[in-house]
Amino acid sequence: MKKLLAVVLMSTFALAGTFAFSASNADAKALFEEKCGLCHSIDRPLAKNKDHEGWKRTVDRMMKKNPGHISEAEAKTITEYLAAERGM
């Protein structure tokens, strides 16, 4: 019985972590669409594949083109999102 309870609890925590990631991934996607879609189509970056460092360079370059539009924290979130979605 204790073993069954432990399995049920671990499964519950694992699922909760999955849903938490999905919500945060949805927030990151919305941020990406809002910030990046203001200047160009979001299809443009989603057509590319880059590693994390490549996406960081791209997001940093975009920040310089429109200073103040994307904060450092937002840039990190967008970079992480793009690396997860379109990473190599």
Image: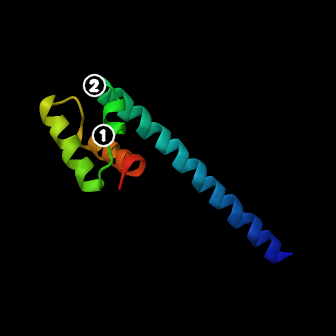
Choose mark 1 or mark 2, whichever is in front: 2
Rendered image: mark on residue 40: 2
Q: Which quarter of the rendered picture does the C terminus lie within?
A: bottom left
What residue is drawn where x is 49% and y is 38%? 26
Rendered image: mark on residue 42: none
Q: Which quarter of the rendered picture does the N terminus lie within?
A: bottom right
Residue in the foreground of this view, choosing between 58 and 16 = 58
User: Which residue was labeled with disc 1?
Assistant: 74
- Which element carries disc 2, helix, strand or loop? loop
What residue is drawn where x is 35% and y is 50%? 83
Residue in the foreground of this view, choosing between 60 and 48 = 48
What residue is drawn where x is 60% and y is 48%? 19
What residue is drawn where x is 54% and y is 45%? 22
Measured Cα–Cα span from mark 1 to mark 2: 17 Å
Left or right? Give the position of 29 relative to 76: right
Question: At which x and y percent is residue 56?
Answer: 23, 49
Ranked by sequence position, the earlier of labels 1 and 2 is: 2
Could you say which quadrant of the image residue 44 lies in?
top left
Mark 1: amino acid: Glu
Mark 2: amino acid: His
Q: Does residue 60 sit above or below 34 in this rendering?
A: below
Q: Residues within 10 Å of mark 2 (few under 14, many from 20)?
A: few
Q: Residues within 10 Å of mark 1 (few under 14, many from 20)?
A: some
Question: At which x and y percent is residue 78?
Answer: 33, 42
Question: At which x and y percent is residue 58?
Answer: 21, 43
